[in-house]
Amino acid sequence: MKFKQEVFEKTLVLGYKGMVGSAIVRRMEDQGLPAPVKASRKEVDCLNQADVRDYIENTKPSSIIVAAAKVGGIEANRSQMAEFMYENIIIAANVIEAAFRSNIKHLMFLGSSCIYPRMAAQPIAEDALLTGPLEESNEGYAIAKISGLKMCQYYRRQYGVCYHSVMPTNLYGKGDNYHPKNSHVLPALIRRFEEARASGAKEVTLWGTGSALREFLYADDLADAVLFMMGIENAPDWVNVGSGEEVSIKQLAENVRNAVGIDCEIKWDHTKPDGTPRKLLDCSLLRNLGWTPKVNLNEGIKRTIEDFRSEGAEGIRRD
């Protein structure tokens, strides 16, 4: 598509070192867009209101992409709910308010599909928001992301700025978090099976029953969708971004095991939670606007395993 150059004249990407932020920077380079201003916690502490205001005022970007967030898997969300809620609310509030005070007209906020009710009708459309109880295990994070989404909507409504959001499904890809306790399901599986391959283990034990259904999106596809939505005139307040395909955790584990190239037994610890039974996004709104993903799950898993091995060879820490 042809991008609105004024939006990307000087884009500030907050959280550029994370999986999503780095994918956005790569995608901007691929599209030949102006080099963005890249900021991690080293450049600006998004939890510090004064620091955020000073940085945005001094940088004077044409647009902002908020990819900075505190993220983690089921156990991290469940055991650190206060931290996940506090930090993500503060990040959203600080950045959105500072952007408005600095007269920034374009802002993209990255949310999460966990904002939707645990038992929402499937596939989940954007209008399912706030229609039922959330999944308890990540409620704090979800409420924080809802707050950010709603702030963008209300600032847009009250002040006429173009602040809007994307709600991605489960993400994975280059630069993912492989922490043994705080990672999401797919990178956790890659690490477990890679460790089993290295040690020669004959079995791997995984959480839950494997029956939960999930949808996954390659991070570079999300980056493409973010830039696409920033170039849309009068874009919706928020859109779902997903692959449109779902897989059971059991099948996912088998796919990862096969891609890693290990012959081991998978055992399931039924005393551990599965999380939300099913979560598939209705992405028809985004599809009707003209965007579709390009990387299928098996190809994405293959690429991500290659990146994991490359990062390990380069001595990049994942704990």
Image (cartoon, rainbow, N blue to C red):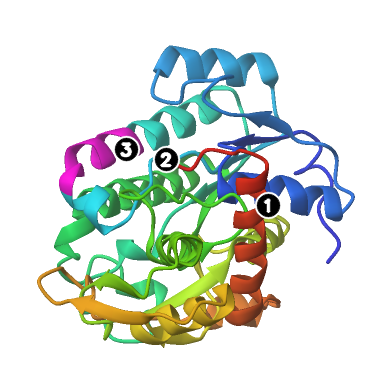
Q: Main secondary structure of the magenta part?
A: helix
Q: Is residue 279 visible?
A: no
Q: Under tag 1, what secondary structure?
A: helix
| Three-letter amino acid code at the position of disc 3 | Ile
Q: Position of residue 85 (x, y in %)?
A: 25, 41
Q: Position of residue 19 (x, y in %)?
A: 57, 49
Label located before the other in sequence (1 or 2)? 1
Name the residue: 67% across, 67% down.
Answer: 303
Dot label at residue 319: 2
> Which residues, given as a range, are shown in magenta?
79-88
Q: Would residue 149 appear left or right of 116 to someone viewing this image?
A: right
Q: Where's the C terminus, which quadrant?
A: top left
| Three-letter amino acid code at the position of disc 2 | Asp
Name the residue: 61% across, 16% down.
Answer: 57
Q: Position of residue 106 (x, y in %)?
A: 63, 42
Q: Nearer the viewer, residue 122 or 57?
A: 122
Q: Is residue 53 visible?
A: yes
Q: Magenta segment: does it hold 86?
A: yes
Mark-to-mark CA distance, 3 and 1 = 34 Å
Residue topped by disc 1: 310
Residue topped by disc 3: 89
Q: Under tag 2, what secondary structure?
A: loop
Label located before the other in sequence (3 or 1)? 3
Q: Under tag 3, what secondary structure?
A: helix
Between marks 3 and 2 in the image, the one whose residue lies nearer the viewer? 2
Q: Would residue 172 appear left or right of 158 to someone viewing this image?
A: right
| Three-letter amino acid code at the position of disc 1 | Ser
Q: Position of residue 4 (x, y in %)?
A: 81, 52
Dot 2, how many residues are within 10 Å of its Cα: few (below 14), some (14-19), or many (20+)? Answer: few
